[in-house]
Image (spheres, rainbow, N blue to C red):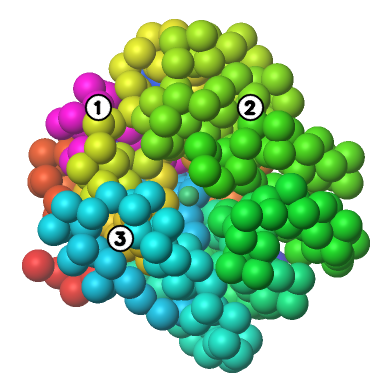
Amino acid sequence: MAKTLLLKNASELVTCRGHAPKCGPAMQDIGIIEDGALWLEDGIIRKVGATDEVLSGIAATPDTVIDATGRCVLPGFVDPHTHFLFAGHRAEEFSWRLRGDTYMDIMERGGGIINSVRATRQASADELLAIGLRRLDSMLSFGVTTVEGKSGYGLDAATELKQLAVMAELDRQHPVEVVRTFMGAHAVPAEYKGRTDEFVDYLLQDVLPLVAEQRLAEFCDVFCEKGVFSVEQSRRLLTAAQSLGLQAKVHADEIVTLGGAELAAELGALSAEHLLHASDAGIRRMAETGVIAVLLPATAFCLREPYARARFMIDSGVPVALATDFNPGSCFSESIPLVIALAALYMQMTPAEIVTALTINAAAAVGRANRIGSLERGKQGDFVLLDHPSHLYLPYHAGVNCVATVVKRGEIVYERQRR
Ligand SMILES: [Zn+2]
């Protein structure tokens, strides 16, 4: 007998149905069903519709009933860009930035990513696992049911593989689904200082093949930035990764306009991330080739940088997704409410576009839009219930977590005490 779950009387059932990823005006279409209901069998959505419609089609008594009266129900949020698994913290560096030092100043002084690399190399797999479980608990409380996590705090074979293996274990142990990205090209480690090309050779010869062989990651990402990895070095790495079956992602045009957006389009990357300084031509090329823009407003906020041009991108036909970029340096925050507030107030995104960017488009940015990101027949039963009757409260209840209940694969995995 299948395990069944009925959710009924949702004041707003936001389905986010439709072809993914969504771009242009389709990002506005979030498929709201008033007085909506869902019927799940063994964690899979079997019926979606108005409550009376869904109820009339069911003969069996459900094992679980959720009455969502007065509540908005949405697909579980997907956070498609994080660096959540690291050891050590950089609170002191943050205080230096408050004083006026730039992120790149700190990086040049041997701080920044390299600092987290030192701590992550020293941490045991068990220590990292414990850290990861706590962080996933926090993300789950914000309604995140799937998260992408990048390696890149090892920068050597042993630690990169350790980070990815721990993320695989977290995926098995925790209800939040963890999608793995290899990002060995996150920074140049101290032992390769001034020899970036040789470090790229090392990654290509000694690390990437192991990652592919052991199926430790689905994606490969690179910090394509002035003073880090050039467009040419990024191209070499990503082309090699693609030939081994990994899909490409690019940290593009975050700090200066370097041509990262153009590179992502040229390579047919699944996504380009950050894009604070992406050129008009790069954005148009992304639209033509269907590269998803993963925008990270909390990072721009924490760095006091201008926000990515979400409005221009959406109007140009680029599918836009949003993510936290949770990491120890530029954005030590896993807060979905912060991302939503900034996208609404400073990026001119509408509430419906924000919902699309955190659900179906974010699912597409991690290659899972066929399985998650919307509430449609045949998809996984991942959804959240808000304290409020409409998705419009997400930006309106500024900076506050509106998520009351989280369901993953048909199981209630988080319930906040009522306020
Ligand atoms: Zn990042």
Instruction: Give coordinates of residue 383: x percent, y percent.
Output: 43, 52
Assess whether mark 1 and mark 3 are in contact (beta carbons under 8 angstroms): no
Q: Can residue 231 be seen in this view?
A: yes
**CA–CA distance in space, label 2 to label 1:** 22 Å
Drawn side of residue 310 relative to residue 223, left or right: left
As for residue 264 lying within the magenta part, the answer is no
Look at 21% across and 43% down and name the residue there.
Answer: 304
**CA–CA distance in space, label 3 to label 2:** 26 Å
Q: Mark 1 points at which residue?
A: 347
Drawn side of residue 284 relative to residue 73, left or right: right
Which of discs 3 and 2 lies nearer the camera? The answer is: 2
The kind of residue on which mark 1 rests is: Met
Residue at disc 2, CB closer than 8 Å to ligand 1: no
Which of discs 2 and 1 lies nearer the camera? The answer is: 2
Q: What element carries label 2?
A: helix
Q: Quadrant of residue 191?
A: bottom right
| Nearest the eye: 348 or 17 | 348
Instruction: Find the magenta span and give its range.
Output: 341-359
Q: Name the residue under label 2.
A: 264
Q: Main secondary structure of the magenta part?
A: helix
**CA–CA distance in space, label 3 to label 1:** 19 Å
Instruction: Give coordinates of residue 290: x percent, y percent.
Output: 61, 19
How crowded pointer 3 is (Cα within 10 Å; few <14, some 14-19, many 20+) is rated as many
Q: Is mark 3 on a helix, strand or loop?
A: loop
Q: Is residue 36 visible?
A: no
Going from the N terminus, do you reach mark 3 or mark 1 first?
Answer: 3
In what quadrant of the picture does the N terminus appear? bottom right
Q: Mark 3 points at which residue?
A: 333
As for residue 349 lying within the magenta part, the answer is yes
